[in-house]
Image (spheres, coloured by chain):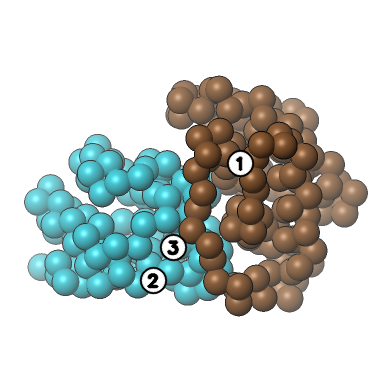
Amino acid sequence: MQMIDDILKELTETKSDYLSEISETKQILQKIEEEFRLMEIHIPRDRWLAIGAHVLAFVRRMTNGERLPVIEAELFAEIHPDMVTLSHKVLSEEKSAWQADDTEAFLLAVHFEAIRAMQMGPL
Amino acid sequence: MSKVKIVIGDRLGKGQNIAKGIEAAGGTAIVIPGVGADMKVGDVMVSESADLGLSFCGSGGAGALTAKTKYGFPVEYGLRSVDAGITALRSGKKVIGFGFMDTEELGRRMVEEYIKLGGK
């Protein structure tokens, strides 16, 4: 929990225009922390920082109704399916109006895959 | 005179169009292959002794922040336009993060500006 607060503080020091997205971002980061704790996978600080920046930008996209381009389906084969499922899980349920599509789930899942592969080996 | 060398790391392993723009402007482009390439920008910049790194994902933040944390590179991210990238370059940033933007114009103009600034 302290790690999440530290990360958000660091990110908003350099990007003060992200302040309005802090609350939603924190909720998603807390879900990620809980899921990885259950999987007994440690998230190093540098990865937290990258994930924090990503989730802040995600929240901003959702707030602005911005959609990213659809990505090629074959790219999903490069990361563990559990990481995609996990990504969908933590990005859903926040706000019913948000549409966290497959592209958003994939982009966050790449972060998860990097951490998973670092500690458990490649696919 | 050596060429300006730029590393490209895109979350989806893309960046080939930027590379074309870089080469067309007289620079050397290194496109990191594979998914998650953005997170390796700093590592490849160091191993290749590159001048600049460009990171692409939703905001470009992951690659830029990872490079900053590991190697202390000055970074800017969350950019959405070529002009914003040029501004970051002028202010001395070495790793610049964008939203997805695989265009020749970006590569070409980054090289042109780098040369103009006297970097090469």
B3, above or below A1, in the image: below
Q: Dividing the image into 4 quarters, which one contains the N terminus of chain B?
A: bottom left
**Distance between mark 1 and mark 3 Cα atoms:** 19 Å
Residue A55: give its label: 1
Image coordinates of residue A13 in percent, x first then y, are 49, 25
Q: Is residue B78 visible?
A: yes
In the foreground, A9 or B72 = A9
**Local secondary structure at mark 1:** helix
* Chain under numbered label 2: B
A56 with respect to B111 (left or right)? right
Whether marks 2 and 1 lie on the same chain? no
* Chain under numbered label 3: B
Residue B9: give its label: 3
**Distance between mark 2 and mark 1 Cα atoms:** 25 Å
**Local secondary structure at mark 2:** strand
Image coordinates of residue B13 in percent, x first then y, are 48, 69
Q: Which residue bears the numbered disc 2?
A: B31
Q: What is the letter of the brown chain?
A: A
Q: Quadrant of residue B75?
A: top left
Q: Give the number of marks.
A: 3
Q: Looking at numbered disc 3 in the image, what kind of residue is underneath it? A: Gly
